[in-house]
Image (cartoon, helix red, strand yellow):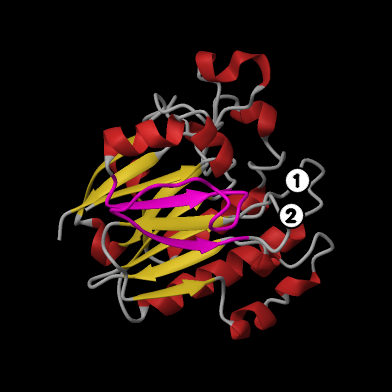
């Protein structure tokens, strides 16, 4: 199975550019996880007869949103968190709104494992959402995937809005303490590893730098490869041995992020 993840930063825009169609034609993912769709199902002109479509869109129009397109019909789909997790971490208590209503998580159950896609809330440039991120969202998402893992191994992907280590961004010293590279956000990622999840790309390429998945629009950053690795595939340790060929695809244009992929050999 070829698993892909891509923050498209507006699926209608990527389709209008023709980038989405050419990506599908060339790469033919078996499962495609999308973040920041900024649309509800039916609002984008998608003609993919080979795929089942599952959307979790934000209540607010044109904002956030995730989707999973799959050639293999999942056994079940869960949108967002369970009510018990949302209530436990008081996710509705953020001044920006309820992140559980922002279309940020889909979990798809397959025969041998779960695939989860996530669009993690941005801490914001003024760090006004760092408390939500650190004390509520990150622990809630971790609990969610650990609950799923009780039934089957989990592979989760998406825009986690954090560069985990200094290898994961072009200018680490200048960005220490800024959103995307705070102690709080990086510790949230550490907790995935402490709970047995494997960063599939870093596991394969432990010392590789200059491997980024997002670039700002400013200062010709993408052409100069001044970027951040903030999009990931992580997997349960029991599944990680079956995951091969983790890749970043910076040649795929259309968004400020590029797709990432892994292959699962079951």
Quadrant location, the C terminus: bottom left
Q: CA distance from mark 2 to mark 1?
A: 7 Å
Q: How many discs mark residues in the rendered view? A: 2
Name above or below for residue 197 compared with residue 231.
below
Q: Is residue 194 visible in this depiction of the protein? A: yes
Residue 148 spot, x, y in % from top left? 40, 76
Q: Which residues are magenta?
A: 29-57
State the residue at coordinates (65%, 49%): 183
State the residue at coordinates (74%, 68%): 98
Prevailing secondary structure class for the magenta stretch in the rendered image = loop
Q: Secondary structure at mark 1?
A: loop
Q: Is residue 151 magenta?
A: no
Q: Are marks 2 and 1 in contact (CB under 8 Å)?
A: yes
Residue 13 spot, x, y in % from top left? 58, 36
Relative horizontal placement of residue 168, taking residue 43 as reference (left or right): left
State the residue at coordinates (64%, 28%): 173
**For residue 52, which quarter of the picture?**
bottom left
State the residue at coordinates (75%, 46%): 124
Which residue is at the far left?
A: 266
Q: Which residue is mark 2?
A: 130
Q: Which residue is mark 1?
A: 124
Residue 142 spot, x, y in % from top left? 52, 68
Q: Nearer the viewer, mark 2 or mark 1?
A: 1
Q: Is residue 48 magenta?
A: yes
Residue 79 spot, x, y in % from top left? 52, 71
Query: As rendered, which of 111 and 91 lies closer to the eye?
Result: 111
Within 10 Å of disc 1 (Cα), the crowding (few <14, some 14-19, many 20+) is: few
Q: Secondary structure at mark 2?
A: helix
Task: Point out the tag, 2 or 1, that comes first from the N-terminus.
Answer: 1
**For residue 234, which quarter of the picture?**
bottom left
Name above or below for residue 118 compared with residue 148.
above
Q: Is residue 207 visible in this depiction of the protein? A: no
């Amino acid at each position: 199975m070829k698993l892909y993840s891509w923050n498209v930063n507006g699926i209608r825009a990527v389709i209008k550019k023709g980038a989405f169609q050419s990506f599908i034609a060339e790469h033919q993912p078996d499962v495609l996880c999308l973040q920041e769709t900024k649309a509800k199902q039916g609002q984008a002109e998608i003609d993919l007869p080979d795929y089942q479509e599952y959307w979790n869109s934000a209540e607010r129009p044109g904002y956030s949103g995730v989707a999973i397109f799959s050639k293999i019909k999942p056994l079940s789909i869960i949108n967002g968190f369970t009510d018990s997790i949302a209530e436990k971490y008081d996710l509705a208590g953020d001044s920006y709104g309820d992140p559980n209503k922002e279309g940020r998580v889909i979990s798809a159950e397959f025969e041998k494992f779960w695939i989860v896609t996530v669009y993690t809330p941005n801490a914001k440039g003024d760090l006004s959402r760092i408390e939500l991120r650190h004390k509520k969202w990150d622990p809630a998402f971790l609990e969610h995937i650990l609950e799923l893992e009780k039934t089957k191994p989990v592979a989760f992907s998406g825009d986690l809005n954090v560069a985990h280590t200094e290898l994961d961004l072009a200018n680490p010293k200048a960005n220490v303490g800024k959103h995307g590279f705070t102690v709080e956000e990086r510790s949230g990622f550490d907790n995935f590893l402490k709970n047995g999840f494997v960063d599939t790309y870093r596991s394969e390429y432990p010392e590789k730098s200059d491997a980024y998945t997002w670039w700002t629009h400013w200062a010709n950053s993408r052409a100069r490869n001044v970027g951040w690795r903030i999009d990931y595939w992580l997997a349960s340790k029991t599944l990680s041995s079956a995951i091969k060929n983790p890749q970043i695809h910076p040649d795929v244009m259309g968004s400020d992020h590029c797709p990432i992929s892994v292959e699962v050999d079951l």
